[in-house]
Amino acid sequence: MAGKLESKNVLVTGSRRGIGKGIALEAAREGANVAVNDLTGADELETLVKEIRGMGRRAVAVLADVSRGDEVNRMVETVERDLGPIDVLVNNAGVESIIPFLEIDEKEWERVTHTNLKGEWLCAQAVARRMVAAKRPGAFVNIGSVQAGMVLPGRTHYAPSKRAIEALTANLAAELAPHNIRVNCIHPGLIDTDMTAWVMKDPQILPIVLDKIALHRAGQPVEIAKAVVFLASDDASYITGQYLYVDGGFRIL
Ligand code: NDP
């Protein structure tokens, strides 16, 4: 049986580990050729490329900083040269830090907002320009965060960067719909990755967080990946401009 992304070319940013890696592997399981990207970790990316090729798909790895336009353009050019035109962009790369508002400095504000928000904007523009020029349809999935709708201590930089992804998604969806490019957003809840290791390992904090989650557990990267594949696939052909919480029912307010 054909996979949900059979023969599609999929670019997943920030995919050497965590949720991005889960998305890259699930896309390959669903028949896609996959381009993986990260800021660092060439060895891990190459191992992932080998795993994807072992599944019978084509794969390429590109080290690039999604917050820099020149690097994003180079990444997209490399992917299209090696795999062919990109059909699906998953804007996953992101960084979080927890710093009280009165202590945060401009450099950290820029690192977080430029990676999480500007990076999604830059990647979307670089890919969309090529799709539009080639008159090819496409699908983008932007990874936000459950924190888009929450207030947690020390997130005056991270939370706005994620909330803004809803506005970015809606505006991109409107501008790109005439070009048959759909744009949606997924807000993950607590997912078991390096980013959340400090929560998962803290016997005091973990039960408090789990008490806020209806399903009373952390999610796994593959559970985000399956939702990404759905939104990227033709099964979601009439869905655009939406955001979906994949969070096990996580609400604190
Ligand atoms: P991880 O920290 O495990 O992985 C994030 C990856 O993004 C890292 O490999 C990191 O690379 C990469 N990255 C960071 N900055 C850049 C950059 N400028 N250019 C390219 N790649 C970059 O995080 P998760 O897998 O947990 O998170 C993935 C996404 O999901 C993020 O956007 C995050 O905000 C979001 N999210 C995660 C949640 C969770 O519970 N885990 C909850 C809600 C949202 P490097 O290590 O080289 O810096």
Image (tube, rainbow, N blue to C red):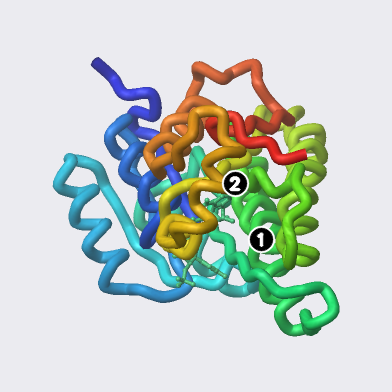
Callout 1 crowding tier (Cα within 10 Å): few <14, some 14–19, many ≥20: many
**Residue 14 visible at all:** no
How far apart in space, not on screen, are marks 1 and 2 (Cα)?
9 Å
Q: Please indicate whether residue 214 sits to the left or right of residue 251 in the image.
A: left
Which one is nearer the viewer's eye here, 167 or 207? 207
- Quadrant of the rendered structure where residue 157 is? bottom right
Relative to 208, say whether 118 is above or below: below
**Ligand 1 contact, mark 1 (Cβ < 8 Å):** yes
The residue labelled by disc 1 is 116
Q: For the residue marked with disc 1, what is the amino acid?
A: Asn
Q: Position of residue 56 (x, y in %)?
A: 18, 40
**Ligand 1 contact, mark 2 (Cβ < 8 Å):** yes
Which one is nearer the viewer's eye here, 198 or 6? 198
Q: Which residue is drawn at 65% across and 38% down?
A: 185
The residue labelled by disc 2 is 143
Q: For the residue marked with disc 2, what is the amino acid?
A: Ile
Callout 2 crowding tier (Cα within 10 Å): few <14, some 14–19, many ≥20: many
**Residue 48 visible at all:** yes
Q: Position of residue 8 (x, y in %)?
A: 40, 35
Q: Residue at x 76, y 42 (%)?
A: 149
